[in-house]
Structure formats: C-alpha cells, structure tokens
Amino acid sequence: MLNVFRSARRTLRRWIKGPHADLGFKPQPDFYYLASFPKSGNTWVRFLLANLLAGEELGLQGFGRYVPDSHIKGDLAYMADPATPFNQMRPRFVKTHLHYRPIFRRAIYIARDGRDAMTSYYHWRNKRSEQPVTLREIITGNIYWGSWSDHVLGWLNSGCELLVVKYEDLYADTAGQVRRILDFCGMQASDEQIASAVAASSFDRMRAKEQAAQGAATPFFVRKGGSGDWRNLFSPEDEELFWRYHRAGMLAAGYGDHSGSS
C-alpha cells in the first residue's frame, strides 16, 4: 500500500511540474546533449569542450560552469544561474547518462565498446561504494543505468539530430574528433585552440587535477583510459553472456560481432 501511495505521489508531482520534472532542468532548443552510457568517455569530452570554450586550462571544479553534468546538483545550479559561462554561450552542452527521450533534440552520442565501458564501470563503482556490484549484474543490465544495449540502441535509433563519436576514435585522434563535434554544432576554432584543449585534457592532467582536489586516497573517476582492458576482467563465460545480451548493440555501434571480437 505504501508503494502505491509513493507511486501516486510521484505521478502527481510530474503532472504538476511537467513530464520532465525529474531532469532537474528545463530543456532548451539550443542544448546539445553529451550522451553516453556511464564510463564511455563523456567526462573526457566535457573536459575537452570546457577547456576549449574557456580558452584556458580549467581546474576540476571549474569545467561544470561551462559544460554541466545534469546528474550533479551543483552543476544544475550553474544551469539555473544566468550569470554562469554556460548561459552566456550558444549553443550549450549538457552531459547526460539518461536513455533517450524525445525531448532530447540534438546530441553527441559517445559510444564505447560495451565490454570496456562495463569494465571501467565495474572498477569505478566497486571502489566508491560499500555495496559492490558484480560483472554479471552489469552485463545483464541489473544496475541503476539499465542495459548497455538498450541505451545504445535507444539513442542510435532515436531519429534526433545525432553525431556518434566512438571512444576508440577519440583516443586515436582526439583533435580530429573534437573538430567533428565542432563542425556538427556549427562552431569555429583554430587548430591551435583545439591542440591546447587536447593537451589540457590529457588523462595525466585530469588525474593530476583529481588528486589535487581530492587527495591520493580517493578512488579516481579517471582511471586509465585506452581500450581492451576488458580482457583482464571478463572470463570466457562472461564474454559469452555479454554477446548473448549485447550483440545487437555492438553491431549497431560498429563493433562487429562475436566472431571477430576476441
């Protein structure tokens, strides 16, 4: 009975505030969403764009004022403040890990080999939480963010104005992928400006900022980067389970099928 009451209360709240009240912000026509399943490179893209937009190397606490994370309360406050750099720019970039919704009209979708995204999420989640999650739970989508394939397929088949940036391409040619993002959004920047943003957003620089802000004992959000680390975590049984659940998502995102993956 209590659960029924809570559900009714949530429904009433949505009806009063609107269908997207749970977002914590009001979507705007000029927003470009940086969308991805967790641990797919979204924070890296935020660093790149924020450093580029600011024209200088930002600290760990500064880049949310340029490219906010919609899942962080402090960044939602930046979005609501008309004086922040975020609200002085057009277009504006907003990070989200949500599954696709029709209200999201334009997006840069950051795709990563699902096995690497899950491996990174496994390590990050279990170093920061007293309630560990198993790899099987991640593979089967029994986590807060749901299924990796559902996330990928929902965005890729959404029909919204979409640019897909693969993490592996970003890692191999960071400046070239930043240029693709800017072209997609109709923005201009010199090669020198992009190169400066890339240098300021290296994994070593991001980790150094985390250590300076949080201390060496705190588990890092920026772990190691790169591709193929899933081989150090997945057992053959885990990989079989992965392909059973995520073959469609891997094919849609351009990662081939099981026969050529190992």
Image: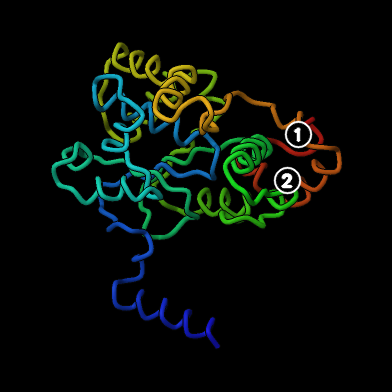
63 with respect to 128 (left or right): left
Asked if residue 214 shows in the view, the reply is yes
Mark 1 residue type: Leu
* Of residues 56 and 111, the one drawn nearer to the viewer in this rendering: 56
Read off the residue under disc 2: 135
1 with respect to 192 (left or right): right
Placement of 100 over or under 212, stated as above or below: below
59 with respect to 217 (left or right): left
Q: Residue furthest top?
A: 192
Q: Secondary structure at mark 2?
A: helix
| Figure quadrant of residue 13 | bottom left
Mark 2 is surrounded, within 10 Å at the Cα level, by few (under 14), some (14 to 19) or many (20 or more) other residues, namely some
Query: Answer yes or no: do the residues labelled 2 and 1 have beta carbons within 8 Å?
Result: yes
Location of the N terminus by quadrant is: bottom right
Q: Residue furthest right?
A: 237
Can you give x and y, in whole percent of width and height, for residue 91 in the image? 24, 40
Read off the residue under disc 1: 233
Mark 1 is surrounded, within 10 Å at the Cα level, by few (under 14), some (14 to 19) or many (20 or more) other residues, namely some
**At 41% from the left edge and 23% from the top edge, which residue is drawn?**
212
Can you give x and y, in whole percent of width and height, for residue 116 in the image? 65, 34
**At 36% from the left edge and 47% from the top edge, which residue is drawn?**
106
Asked if residue 254 shows in the view, the reply is no
**At 26% from the left edge and 19% from the top edge, which residue is drawn?**
56
Calculate the distance from the C-alpha at mark 2 to the C-alpha at mark 1: 9 Å
Q: Earlier in the sequence, mark 2 or mark 1?
A: 2
Can you give x and y, in whole percent of width and height, for residue 201 in the image? 41, 21
Placement of 115 over or under 57, stated as above or below: below
